[in-house]
Image: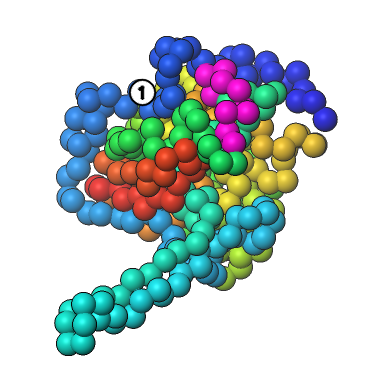
Amino acid sequence: MALPPEFHDIAKRVNNWGRWGEADEIGTLNLITDGVVRSAAATVRTGRRVPLALPLQQDGVQTGLIPGRVNPLHTMIAVNLEIFGSGTVATSDDAVTMALQAATHWDGLTHVSHSGKIYNGRPAGSVTAHGRAAFSGIEKARHIVSRGVLLDVARAHATDSRWPAALTGGHAVTPEDLEAAEELAGTAVRSGDIVLVRTGQMRKYLAGDKQGYAFPSPGLSIRCPEWFHARDAAAVANDTLTFEIFPPEIDDLWLPVHALDLVEMGMLQGQNWNLEELSEACADEGRYEFLLSAMPEPFVGGTGTPVAPVAIL
């Protein structure tokens, strides 16, 4: 089924192709300037560090719904091996087989395509089995450090602020939800920010309900890309498996937010981020901005990457 006119109308309004030149391969990460990073560093007051990544383990978040997206398989390939002879120093080594988008990760700009194109108007065929992503491989996103802003939509929806509720599975996060979370945060999203949207869905996975975490899931509405585009957000991540609402809010329109964010805007998006401890930390300190380090693993030609983000308050 062809993408509907509604999708193409939004795509025209958020399109960033050529904004940073025809050779650009990093999209909205261009908005993270030296000045933005200096301002981000000024948000550090206590030095409190909050990790946001899930453990990399075989019993991870992937359910088998997406072919080939395997949870990490960790194998020991050497155990106390005295490679230089008996009585010498021994080494232990291990190896991992995993999908790059298996756990807490960034989706690269080549992760999806639509209408035969990837970001900046390049052909989708530039991603090949043996050559990988010829353009906008995840290694091009060399440094992702900026001001992070937690938009705790679940807490903003809670009737009792002491108990940050989780959104229901059928909840499409709207721009109005984001603005309510901005009001709670006491700060506005600005150019170069990395926005973290908390739905509370991660609680299901942490409680052992992997299937319930995956489906149905709250997530971003097709209306959200315009909101992020208007504010010049550098990247967005949330605490769900699919990032956008799943099943989709528009029948038979699958992954439209992915296509708008990655292909049209050139904006990285992150999934499976554990925002529960951060939610508590921000509420404790009464502020929702922080220095965020979310460096990608530089897999050459990769369409995504595992990431171990840290918020520093």
Residue 57, image x, y percentages: 48, 68
293 is within the stretch colored magenta: no
The N terminus lies in which quarter of the figure? top right
Is residue 240 something that shows in the picture?
A: yes
Choose top left, top right, bottom left or bottom right for residue 145: top left
Choose top left, top right, bottom left or bottom right for residue 122: top right
124 is within the stretch colored magenta: yes
- Furthest-front residue in this view: 85
Of residues 240 and 121, the one nearer the viewer is 121
Of residues 66 and 312, the one nearer the viewer is 66
Tell me which residue sits at (52%, 19%) in the image. 120
Tell me which residue sits at (58%, 51%) in the image. 241
Residue 183, image x, y percentages: 42, 34
Left or right? Give the position of 193 relative to 1: left
Colour scheme:
rainbow
Look at the magenta stretch and give its main secondary structure.
helix
**Above/below status of 59 relative to 101:** below
- Furthest-right residue in this view: 1
Left or right? Give the position of 140 relative to 119: left
Residue 179, image x, y percentages: 49, 31
Tell me which residue sits at (17%, 45%) in the image. 45
Going by the numbered disc 1, the residue's amino acid type is Asn
Tell me which residue sits at (33%, 56%) in the image. 51
Q: Which residues make up the magenta segment? A: 119-128
Of residues 134 and 280, the one nearer the viewer is 134
Of residues 246 and 306, the one nearer the viewer is 306
**Above/below status of 66 relative to 150:** below
Residue on which disc 1 sits: 30
Is residue 186 something that shows in the picture?
A: no
Choose top left, top right, bottom left or bottom right for residue 166: bottom right
